[in-house]
Amino acid sequence: MSLTEHLLRPLLTSAAARPLLTHYDDALGSRIELSVATLANWAAKTANWLVEEFDVEAGDDVAVALPAHWQTAGVLLGAWWCGAHVVGDPSGARVAFVGPDAAVGQADATAVVALDPLGRGLGGSVPAGAVDYLSEARLAGDDFAPLFPIAGDTPVLLGSTVDDVLAHAKTRAGQLGIGAGDRVLSTREWTLPDGVVDVLLAPLSAGAHLVQVTNPAAEKLPGHRAAERTTVEVS
């Protein structure tokens, strides 16, 4: 079973409509809330797109160089759903996901993620040699099923396997004091691997709600804590 299935299947079964990820960008003044079902939908579209457009198979390298963002969550969970091996170095990767200001090249294909708060694509400003992730992946299917089962020893994050990453995420959830029903506030970047494990995977493995603040403004954090009724912080 893929890492994404391990993380999302229990939540989809028990509470698909409940909020799972809330993303603030204090520099833009934006707030976006995604339910379990909505995040799973973005992940499924991403997985279908990677398989259908780029022939990504289990164990293939997919580079992710993106900030902490709700779109990054969809990219990561989609990559893992089809068994991709998430890396930081785009050299030789089947696909590299980068932000709108990044250079294009090195990977076989480059997918530019617009990071628009409302999920809009790049419009007419797609760099030469790249594709617009948001505009293209949204056309992919809403449901995903791997062509072959994803084995627990499949590498999924900088050489670590499905089983290893899942176990580490659960361990970190306990160490960070994150439990089911918690509302976790984070201002931390999703660096590979520690930031992604602590901030994204640990809360998901525990069934907690993540409130991620990008470009945090210190004066706004007390308001975020109060409005979101957060119970744990990861910074």
Image (spheres, helix red, strand yellow):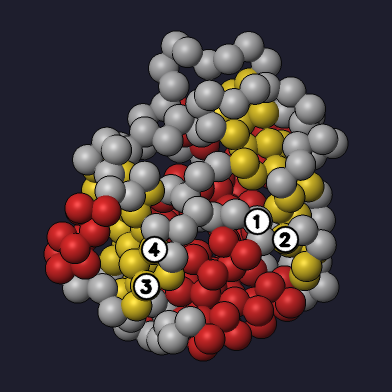
- Position of residue 34 relative to residue 168, above or below, is above
Q: What residue type is labelled 1?
A: Leu
Residue drawn at 38 percent across, 48 percent down: 214
Task: Quote the CA–CA distance across marks 4 and 3.
Answer: 6 Å
Left or right, 10 with respect to 66, comes to left
Whole-Å distance between the Cαs marked 1 and 2? 8 Å
Q: Quadrant of residue 22?
A: bottom left
Which mark sits nearer the N-terminus, 3 or 1? 1
x, y (%) of residue 36?
37, 65
Q: Do the residues labelled 1 and 2 touch (CB within 8 Å)?
A: yes
| Element type at mark 2 | strand
Q: Disc 3 marks which amino acid?
A: Glu
Which residue matches tag 2? 157
Query: In terms of sequence position, does the residue under pointer 2 or pointer 4 come before the other?
Result: 2
Q: Label 1 neighbourhood size at 10 Å, few (<14), some (14-19), many (20+)?
A: some
Q: Residue 179 carries which label?
A: none
Q: Is residue 7 above or below residue 83?
A: below
In which quadrant is the N terminus drawn?
bottom right
Residue named by callout 3: 233
Q: What residue type is labelled 4?
A: Ser
Q: Taking 200 as reference, is 92 left or right?
A: right
- Percent across and percent down for residue 9 are 50, 74
Q: In what quadrant of the picture does the C terminus appear?
A: bottom left
Q: Residue under circle 1?
A: 192
Q: Which of marks 4 and 3 is nearer the N terminus?
A: 4
Q: In this view, does 48 lie to the left or right of 113?
A: right
Q: Is mark 4 on a helix, strand or loop?
A: strand
Q: Is 197 on the left-hand or right-hand side of 32?
A: right
Q: Nearer the viewer, mark 3 or mark 2?
A: 3
The reply to whether discs 3 and 1 touch (Cβ–Cβ < 8 Å) is no
According to the image, label 4 marks what residue? 186
Q: Distance between the residues labelled 3 and 1?
A: 19 Å
